[in-house]
Image (cartoon, rainbow, N blue to C red):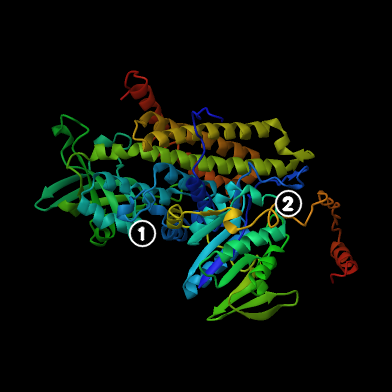
Amino acid sequence: MHVVVCGKVIPDSSVTLEIDPDAKRMRRTDVPHELDPAAASALEEALRLTEQHGGSVTFVTMGIPDASVGIRRALAMGASAAVHLLDDAFAGSDTLGTAKALAAAIRQQPRFDLVVCATESSDSYSGIVPVQVATLLGVPALTFAKQVFVDGETVTIHRQSEEGYAVVTAALPALVTTTSGINEPRYPQLKGIMAARKIEIQQRSAADLSLGPDDVGDSAARERVLSVGAPPSRGAGRLIHDEGDGGREIADFLAQAGVI
Amino acid sequence: MGDRERGMDFALTEEQHAIRAAVHDLCARFPDVYWRELDRKDEYPEGFVQELTEGGWLGCLIPEEYGGAGLGITEASIILEEINRSGGNAIAAHAQMYVMGTLLRHGSEAQKHRYLPEIARGALRLQAFAVTEPNAGSETTRIETMAVRTGDRYVVNGQKVFISRTQHSDLMLLLVRTTPYDQLSDKTRGLSVFLVELKRAVAAGQIVIQPLDVMLNHQTTQLFIEDLEVPAENLIGEEGMGFRYIIDGWNAERILIASEAIGDGRWFVDRAAAYASERVVFGRPIGANQGVQFPIAQAHARIEAADLMRYKAAWLFESGQRCGAEANMAKLLASQAGWEAANACLDAHGGYGFVREFDVERKFRETRLLMTAPISNNLVLAFLGQNVLGMPKSY
C-alpha cells in the first residue's frame, strides 16, 4: 500500500505570528519552521498503517525553502520519500491553487492507495484543501477520522461528530483527513535522522507539474483577503471571592449560562 | 552577504537542528515529576535510558562500522545539553556515550568488534569508569589498585571510590597500576586500563559494590576489589599506557560536560525568567525589580558566552586541531555560568526554590557537581595558568 501524506511546514509554535499588512498574509520568512503538528499526526497514522499492512509513505508539501526542516523531520519519522513543491510561481496560491498543485504531485506518483491529510493546518485553519484534493483526484474523501482502518480494498474510519462517531467506509484509493487527537506522533529516532539525510527531497516546480498562471499563484487565486485584523480581546473574567456562598454564586452563573 | 565570503558561520546544520528537536520531543515525555521521583528514591533512570537506547542516541559517537551513528562531539554535546535543558539529568547518557571512547581509540579490533556493536544497540551497558581511589583523586598517577599478571590473566586488588552506575552497568573500564610507582622513571607510565565484565565479577565475589549516600542521584558507589581475575585479552591497548589513554578522552569529556552545564543554565534561566515574570509582590511582578532581573540577565549572557567557547572547542576537536585550552575553558566557563544561573534562579524563587516540587533545588544540586567533577575547576585554572600561559607549576 502506498500512502501519500500532504502536510504543511509552518512557523514554529514558539514564534509570535505576524501579519504582513501589505500582503495581508502571515510572515513566513526569517522565522524558524517546523512540521505542522497536525501534519505529524496524519503522517503518524500513515506510518502506522504501512507498518501494519506493508508499503511506503511519501510526504508532499508546498512551501518556501525553509520548509526543508519540516520535510527532513517527516523523513526522519519514517516517510521514505518527500516531494517539495517549491517555486515562486506558487506564491499567493489560494486553497484551490494549492490543491491543484498537490493533486498534480500525487498523480505523478507511480501509484497511491490512500492520501492522508490533517483536517486543517495549525496556522491558517482553512480546512478546505484536503477535500479539494480529493475532488481533483476523483477519489472519495473521508473526513474527521479519529480512527482509520484499512482492509484490502477499502478504508474505514470512525468519523468524529459532536454526538459520537460514524463508521464510514470507502473503496481505495481514497483520501482521509485526521483529527488532531488521533494519535501521538512519534519523535524521530537518531537512525531515522541519519537515514533521512541520505534521501533526496524531490523538488517540483509549477512547470514540472504542468501547471501555469491560470492554475496556481496569485494570478489564479479566486479567493482574496480583503482585510486582516486581530480578534477582539477577551473581557476580564469575573472573580468570585468565597465568603461561604462562592459555590452557590458559581452554580448560579453556570445555570444562567445554560451549562448546568 | 553579496560576493564577500562569510568569515564565520555560527549556524547549526539542519541535521543538528533535527537532533535537538528530536531530543527535545523525547525529553518532553519525561517531565519534571519523573526526575523528581527518581531523585527522591535514588533510582536509576531506567525508562529514560531505555528510550534513548531504542532511539539509537547512546551510540551516537560509535562509528557506523560498529553499528553506531558515527556522529561528532558537537552532535553528542547537543543531545546532552538538550536533556539537561529539559529538566532531566544527562549523566547516564553521557557515560554510555563517552566511556566507550577509550575502547574505540585504543582497543584492539577484536575487542571493538566484540563489544562496540552491543554497546551501540544498548544490549551492553558500559557506563562505569573506575579511576578515583580513596588516596588518589585529582592525582591520578598515585592510584594504588594493583594488577599482577599471572599467566593469561591479571589478578587485581584494591579499592575505588565515587564510581557511578556500577549497579546498572554490564561492563566497566578499570584503571589500575601494573608497575609499582617507585619503580617508574616516568610517573605517568605504569597504569593500565582493563575492560571488566562487571556483573560476572560481582557474582563471583571479586568486586563488592557499596553504595555511597551522596547529595546527587548518580548511583554513586565504592568498590572493593579482591582477587579480581581479568583475562589478559581484556587489557586495552598497551600495558603501562593507561594514563595516556585516559588523558586522550579528557578534551571530549570537557566539551560534553560544558554542554550539560549550558543545558542546566538554560533551564535555570528559563524557569527564573518565567517565575519572575509571573510572581507578583508589592503589586508588580518581581522580575520588574532589577535586583531580581539583572542576575538572571547576567546569567543568560554568561551562558551564551560559554556556549561560544563550547562550540569553538568542539569545532577544533572535530577538525583535528589542539583543543585542550578551549575544552578546559569551555568546562570552566560553562560550569560557572550554570552555577550562577542556579543561584539566580534560587534567589528569584525565594523560599519556593527550596520546595522539592519546584525542581530548582534538585537541579541546583546537580549542576553544582560540574564545578567539581569530573575535574575541579581549580585544576582547570592550574592547567590554563601553567600549560597555556607558561606560569610556574603548583604541583
In which chain is the residue bearing label 1? B
Task: Tell me, for residue B121, which label it has, or none.
Answer: 1
Q: Quadrant of residue B288?
A: top right
Query: Could you tell me how far apart the alpha carbons at marks 1 and 2 are, in whole angstroms?
Result: 54 Å
| Secondary element type, mark 1 | loop
Would you say residue B255 is visible in this rendering? yes
Q: Nearer the viewer, mark 1 or mark 2?
A: 2
Q: How many marks?
A: 2
Position of residue A165 measured from the top left corner of the image (x, y, whole percent): 69, 78
Q: Which chain is mark 2 on?
A: A
Residue A191 placement (x, y as % from top left): 42, 57
How far from the left and from the top, in percent, is residue A177? 65, 69
Q: What amino acid is labelled 2 in the image? A: Ser
Q: Is residue A32 left or right of residue A48?
A: right
Q: Farthest top residue?
A: B391
**Residue at the spot x=57%, y=71% of the render?**
A114
Pointer 2: what residue?
A219
